[in-house]
Image: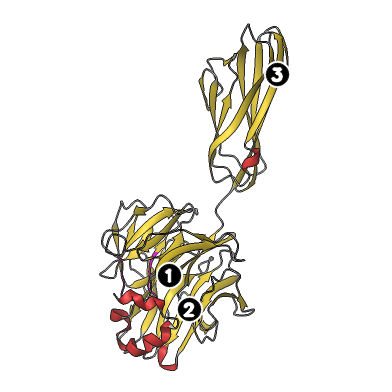
Amino acid sequence: MPRVLAVQSRPVSRLALVVAAVVSSVVFAPMASASFPGTNGKLYYYDVVNGNFDVYSVNPDGSNRARLTTDPAFDVSAVASPDGTRIAFTSDRTGVEQVWTMDRGGGGVTQVSTDGVDERGFISRVFSWSPDGRIYYSNHDQVIVSVNPDGSGRALTGVTGFDLAVSPSGRRIAHSRPSATIGSVDLWVSDVDGGNAVRVTTNPAFTVSVNPEWSPDGARIAFSQMAPLVNRQNIGVATTTGSAVTALTTGPNDYGPQWSPDGTKIAFVDGANRTFSTVDSDGRNRTPLGASPGGPGVSMFITDWATDAPKADAAVTLTATTAPVGYVDYTIGVTNNGPSPLTSAAVVLTLPNTVTALAAPPPGCTSNARTITCTIGPLQVATATQRTIRATIGLLTIGQFTATATRTTGTPTDPRPTNDTATATCSALTSAGITC
């Protein structure tokens, strides 16, 4: 199968043998793109270990490396959704290469496409997330299609091409097309419906521009520039109108640019030195990354530099105060310590056996005798909210009794689960003699 070319340590030399037919017959593994602005998060890449293509994630400094796929199939091209909760990738685990999604830990795998993905481009980026959470990909006919992450809502865009990347605004799409000049491929930018198309590069013969990657502000596009007759691959940058095309690196074997979410750096594969590297967005300060997986050959490819997934530290407190004789008021407090807004959270108050909540819980809470569930949110950073539940104390209650409040679910992820639970203890000599 043609994709086995991906195990070559110098893909550009293989391209030199067949560059006249680069679009129709040369295949490296497909690639994906996202360039959403935000805080720099994980790098997603694929690597070949013991002959198996799999998807990995890692922090730029090399920490928290994780293998996300273990299927013996050809699993490549991971890219995170705008909210960071799902990872799209391509796999041929059903016999035909398709777009799939999984959660950040590698579970919840779902097939998205059914019409295949384009395999005719060199280092072909076949899909991209849009800001509204749809997936765009180039199918077997090089028709660009958009679809929901669950596979529903499939729609043709009116754009034909490969190696596509949707702009951060969601209104424009960069893609590669073969030109009339022998052996050349150029970058184009159009509206997502194919209108207002602009040619970004005008390459000479046997020169290829692929792997478009939008800057987070949508003003520039980084790409791989390949001139196999002179054995050179480098990273280029252009304005979206093609008015300024410059070389960001000089090669000789640099490819696969991924813009950092904060817009300051571009990561790429340094094939000559078998490393992941970065440069500043102006081309200065070329630096190897600790995230490089190492190994004897360049069979790896960075496919996304994702935004750090939103996190909200929802700290839970619980206080108990005596109310009228025979009652205790339990107050659940939730404070959002950030760094992101809290969309929602469920906090469950569990009462001891001899204590029962009153039938009318506060708004946003439901009661089932000794279990009260309260929905909290939205809640901005550095703000707090409270819910107070009045409970009756059983006549035979004697000694200490403890209630517990626990955050059970929430969006986004809570980075500090150690403060998700709180307790409140009271003492009773009789139901009329309670201290808290």
Magenta-colored stretch includes residue 407? no
Residue depicted at 53% across the width and 79% down the height: 274
Picture disc at residue 50: 1
The relative height of residue 386 versus residue 132 in the rendered view (above or below) is: above
* Dot 3 or dot 1, earlier in sequence: 1
Q: Which mark is residue 334?
A: none
Can residue 244 be seen from the camera position used here?
no
Q: Which residue is mark 2?
A: 297
Q: Image quadrant of residue 91?
A: bottom left
Element carrying mark 1: loop
Q: Position of residue 152 (x, y in %)?
A: 31, 51
Q: Quadrant where the N terminus lies?
A: bottom left
* Dot 3 amino acid type: Cys
Q: Secondary structure at mark 2?
A: loop
View extreme (front): residue: 50
Q: CA distance from mark 3 to mark 1?
A: 61 Å
